[in-house]
Image: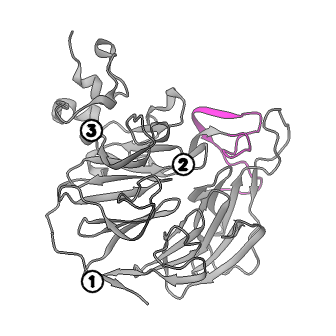
Amino acid sequence: MNICLRKCCCAFFCCTCCRQTPLNVLTNQTILLPKNEATKDELETEQLYIYGSVPEELKTVLLEGYGPNPVKKIVCGKYHSIILLTNNRLIGFGLNDLGQLGLPLETKEAKNITELAINIPDLGNFDILDIAAGDDFSLILIRTQDNQTKIIKFGTEIIFKYVSVPNVQSQNLEKIPNSVTGNINKIIAFEKRKIFCTDTNEIYLGGCDFYGTEIDEYVLLKKFETNIKNIFLQKEGCLVQDTEDNIFVLGDNSYRELGYRTGFTNEFKPFRYKFENKNIKKLSVGARHILLLLDTGELFCLGDNSDNQCCGTTSTSQFLNKIELNNEKVADCYAGYNYNLIILENGSVYTWGNTDNGKLGYLEDKVTQETPKEILWMKIRCINYVCLGKLLSIIVTGKQENAIVKERGNNNNEPVVLVEQN
């Protein structure tokens, strides 16, 4: 039998000449297709690789026709995903039973990548600034020609899942409080909760509060004195990172995901940990756990460990737990719903945690993967973007100049010194 390595490494299953062997059985002894000039064009084709609960036709999707480096942002709800392209267009796939893709309710599901048009009357020309997705809704932040920012919601509160409902609007403008000052510049959503931030550093909360109680209108959480860089939502908490890389936390701390030993905090408090002479390169937040990546390439976990997403031996990780990978430095990290994906500076991709539906990128016959495990064949790709949802993982590949890892960095094995804040 002729073995076709070229096809095996670039498709989800082996080609016709060796179809019997799925890629998830690759071992450390497997010879991967070398990345050379003969295969460079094929390996640098812009594609989506999707693992988890999706139709087979969405496992690998070529991004032809959308221009070079097309993906600007991806967000995932419970059963739907929306992609913002760099040319001011939206595409998406998944369930639309509640209008969460902005399509007519007669379209229950988009099983292929589908163009998503915004159909709000009298908007005129606009730019799409940001997107967010909750369990059964999506938010689209736009800026109109007169420099006003508005939030469009995809989704309806009317539940008719199994019948056609004509003339029901699945797209509406969010009602923004009159007290808002400045323009909206960030939106984020998680499950039933939604948040927006203004360029005057006000943070407003909608959907439901951190006790799980539904709220009808957006309410002001806090006006920060410093400029806000990032906002993260968890199942019961919220984290804010400012432009000086200070981190503030709010909400339930039952799984010690906010770093404190006590329970609920109803006002923003400084994050418990700081690092002496080292900076936080990236903060990534899962349902009830946190990943902290330092500029030295060291990675730490904190919070819920029910699916071994923080490694270790306890059900919760109250203290920072360092993830060791044979002294390899981490280039990027992503926290999903009880699982993680990291990219090392040598280009390797590792996942661990909850294994539901193959969302880790390989098939497992156990509920959790306790330690980081490599997706062997992804090492030969140029990874440009990653998004982890509740039930699926999306990896975008493309050209080397746009890749997350462009070259190996230098090692820095200085010990980490933790400083607890009062």
Judge whether 274 appears above or below 118 on screen: below
Quadrant for the N terminus, please: top left
Judge whether 294 appears above or below 60 on screen: below
Dot 2, crowdedness within 10 Å: few (<14), some or many (≥20)?
Answer: many
Say what amino acid the circle numbered 3 marks: Leu
Q: Nearer the viewer, residue 11 or 360?
A: 360
Q: Which residue is mark 2?
A: 390
Label number found at residue 172:
none
In the rendered image, residue 303, in percent from the top left (x then y), is placed at 46, 66
Dot 3, crowdedness within 10 Å: few (<14), some or many (≥20)?
Answer: many
308 lies left or right of 40: right
Residue 140 drawn in magenta:
no
Evaluate if marks 3 and 1 touch, with contact meaning CB atoms under 8 Å apart: no
The kind of secondary structure element at disc 3 is helix
Residue shown at the point (47%, 50%) measured from the top left: 388
Q: Which residue is mark 3?
A: 376
Q: Which residue is mark 1?
A: 276
Stretch of the chain drawn in magenta = 96-125
In the rendered image, residue 295, in percent from the top left (x then y), is placed at 27, 70
Say what amino acid the circle numbered 2 marks: Lys
Dot 1, crowdedness within 10 Å: few (<14), some or many (≥20)?
Answer: few
The kind of secondary structure element at disc 1 is loop
Q: Nearer the viewer, residue 401 or 309?
A: 309
In the rendered image, residue 51, in percent from the top left (x then y), is placed at 45, 38
Magenta: main secondary structure equals loop
View extreme (front): residue: 314
Say what amino acid the circle numbered 1 marks: Glu
162 lies left or right of 291: right
Between marks 1 and 2, how big is the CA–CA gap? 34 Å
